[in-house]
Amino acid sequence: MNRLALALSGAIARVTESALGPYQTAVVRIGFSATWLLFLLREFPHRAELYGPDGPWSKPLAEELVGQNGAFTALLWFDGRVWFEIGYGFAMLSSLLLMLGWRTRTMSVLFMVGVLSLQNRSVFMGDGGDNVLHLMSVYLVFTRCGQVWSLDARRARLTAAARARGERSGDATGPALWAVLGLALAAVAAAGRLDGDPLVPALLLAVLVAQALWWAVGRYARTAQPRIALDLVANIVHNGALLVIMAEACLIYATAGWYKIQGSRWQDGTAVYYPLHLDSFSPWPALADLLSSSGTLVMLVTYGTVLVQVAFPFTLFHRRVKNVLLAGMITEHAVIAVVLGLPFFSLAMIAADAVFLPTSFLRRLGGWAARARGRLFSRMGLFSRLSRAGRASEPEPRVPEPGTPSHVGFTA
């Protein structure tokens, strides 16, 4: 009984005292924001036909659908090409800044608004990866995804170093940014543009109030207890969102695998053959013909896909087997991106898979990237503070000691 109590108390302490998976949430943040940014850049010449006023899915049709399902989209708030261009540029900018990790708390909210606005404006534009991106954009709002590999983490280290030297350091950008967003939200609500599904407006208001409370406590609290309490709540919310992201990825693979088992083409081992000969999914016909020329290979890939998808959720209890299947799934998505011409679907799925990558591997990956960046800056002759910081690998985030708040991640 004592062992059980000790284990339970240790688990509670681990969940409340630190935000788990800092590298995993960082790579999920970078992966999904980069996927969405690359998609928007690729479709930039066709943006008006996909999501704008020139598309076959007209504004009246979109308004009718939104009125039925209550979906959130800011693109229907006003008419005209100018508002659409502002919304599209806003989505690209928020994706870029979230990928870089600048004000991740703010950018994760704006990233969600951009994703939902465009996708709910034209619901038929996507290849399956958009559904994953849609969900993950909401989950990222609840995570402390800027603990590592972000400009926020770099700013936090510089601030801590300045405080250690006895220098006073303040942050006026964050409160000003949230004040502007609060005024914008109030103006939109007063104009009656938030009718429909109340979930997203309520979420925006909740995040705004939480950020205001965090700033007020950090500025005016005379003791550390209020800050510790808020930090504890932030850690619990982050860890819960991380668990939801992992469960969502498992659910996607489990449902896909079990539905495949019910299909006759998957049962007889020929399901992979047919997509390789569809014009819509054959950017490289010669490569598709080469892969489909071997019946044995087609059968192995078909059965292997079903096996990996069904078995993956159960392998989470065994680290080595999980890592092997994870490498197989990432390889499979990379092949799908090239052979079937679905790069953004594959990038979205790889970003979701990244939440299960080992921390040791991600730290080595970050070290390689930092050294490569340092060599690049050295060759360019940029001997600045940024290049010197880039030569060293990202330090592992330390678990805060009991009674010590960690402010990295819950920044503006």
Image (cartoon, grey):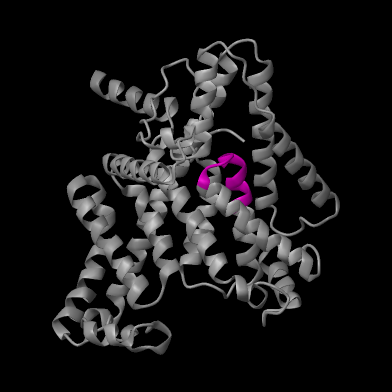
| Secondary structure, magenta segment, majority class | helix
Q: Position of residue 39 (x, y in %)?
A: 52, 66
Which stretch did the figure color magenta? 100-111
Where 272 sits versus 329, above or below?
below
Residue found 73% across the figure and 76% down from its top? 53
- Quick check: 336 left or right of 126? left
- Quick check: 166 left or right of 210? left
Q: Is residue 105 magenta?
A: yes
Q: Nearest the camera: 201 or 167?
A: 167
The answer to whether one can see residue 109 in this image is: yes
Where 42 sits versus 228, above or below?
below
Q: Nearest the camera: 178 or 142?
A: 178
Q: Position of residue 46 (x, y in %)?
A: 62, 76
The answer to whether one can see residue 232 in this image is: no
Query: How many numbered marks are there?
Result: 0
Q: Position of residue 267 (x, y in %)?
A: 23, 79
Q: Classify residue 334 by image quadrant.
A: bottom left
Q: Position of residue 283 (x, y in %)?
A: 38, 82
Residue found 28% across the figure and 80% down from its top? 272
Where 12 sits versus 376, above or below?
above
In what quadrant of the picture does the C terminus appear?
Answer: top right
Q: Is residue 204 magenta?
A: no
In what quadrant of the picture does the N terminus appear?
Answer: top left
Where 97 sits versus 124, above or below?
above
- The residue lying furthest to the left in this view is 296
Q: Classify residue 295 by image quadrant.
A: bottom left
- Quick check: 345 left or right of 336? right
- The residue lying furthest to the right in this view is 191
Residue found 61% across the figure and 47% down from its top? 109
Residue found 55% across the figure and 33% down from its top? 410
